[in-house]
Amino acid sequence: MASALGIVAATVFVPTPAVSAALACEAGRVVTEVPWAQRMLAPERVWTHATGRGVTVAVIDSAVDGNHRQLRGRVEKLMDYLPPASPASCVAHGTEVSSIIAAQRVSGVGFRGLAPDAKILPVRVSDRIEGNGATVDPPTFARAIREAAARPGVRVMNISLVLSTDDPLVRAAIADVVAADIVVVAAVGNNHANDDTPFTDPPSFPAAYPGVLGVGAIAETGELLPQSQVGSYVDVVAPGADILVATPIEGHTVESGTSFAAPFVAATAALIREERPTATASQVVSRIIATANPSRGGPGYGTGIVDPYRAVTEVLAGEDPEALPEAPAPVVDPAAERREARWRELGGISLALFGIGIGLVIAIVVGTSVYRRGTSRGWRATRAPRTP
């Protein structure tokens, strides 16, 4: 468990045969199947509206491998806050989190990021996994948060790290970032031991700070991940069990934890910020919460399961309806207009001929009737008898 001065990844690792979950110096195997989280969220529905273009997501985490073919061109220069003596690490956490947000389409691979056109600003503050590795102290953590938020284009911040106790410097940094109109998304942590404990957990930070979207994790069945913390600081949940992610160098692996639920929500915020550029950070947070899909309920689920499509497209109560786009000006086709005029002319002629034909038929019928009656009476005039 994190101490007051410790920063740890909100992660439960699930090893695969191809790569160590904690360290991923070796490339993972390439997975071709579409992962379950992607099938559940169906991001192709929302990509016709937004893909995250023009939005930078600051990922406060470990380093990110921008050379992975699914992240190439999406990752900005690293902001590194670990001590200079700390060597470049193979810790995969930052790469995995970032891939959920911005992984690109690659032929033969089903996995894609939820906001594939978003940019990633990697901010290295921790290589600590399950108690091992370097990490920064809270003052440096707070400075990293502030300086990342000051970078041009940053409109969303993902923090898949937790502090077990409130730190005033971190709290102040988060408050300033929220006030600067940046959406802050944070994992709630994985310290819910079992269902025998009271149905609430001590808060984790920064998820429990005001204005921050705290994200819990669910499995494919919709059940809460057993370790996902429970409490009022959980605002929404997202897929977080057996999540397919990109590993450094190449390939993929599977991980579990609230670390991997948070970037689904951060990516959703990036989609909203592209589609609704005038929406404030507070409005983006409210929109994500209001459009969450129903879950099994309880303090561990927040308001429900994040739904990127609804979050981007729905008009909420109290909002002004969106104006419909102007109809495009009709394209004039002279040849088509001539054909239409000719058809109208032929139609008028046909109608006139039809009227003449009907008149002739009526005249023939009436004339025949008169002729027969006149012939039968020898064409003599007749007078009806007078009434007595």
Image (tube, helix red, strand yellow):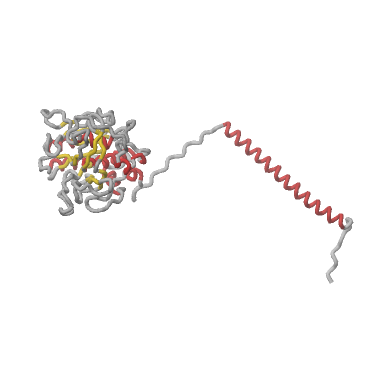
Q: Quadrant of residue 124?
A: top left
Name which residue lies at 85% across and 68% down: 386
Q: Where residue 70 sits in the image (x, y, percent)? A: 28, 31
Q: Is residue 335 above or below residue 356?
A: above
Residue furthest bottom as drawn: 388
Q: Is residue 213 above or below residue 93?
A: below
Q: Does residue 346 appear in the picture of this structure?
A: yes
Q: Nearer the viewer, residue 18 or 162?
A: 18
Q: Quadrant of residue 95?
A: top left
Q: Is residue 203 above or below residue 114?
A: below
Relative to 324, 119 lies left or right: left
Q: Where residue 136 sits in the image (x, y, percent)? A: 12, 35
Q: Does residue 52 appear in the picture of this structure?
A: no
Q: Quadrant of the C terminus?
A: bottom right
Q: Where residue 101 sits in the image (x, y, percent)? A: 27, 37
Q: Nearer the viewer, residue 176 or 72?
A: 72
Residue furthest front as drawn: 17
Q: Nearer the viewer, residue 268 or 30?
A: 30
Q: Quadrant of the N terminus?
A: top left
Q: Quadrant of residue 189?
A: top left
Relative to 110, 22 lies left or right: left
Q: Where residue 122 sits in the image (x, y, percent)? A: 21, 33
The number of discs equals 0
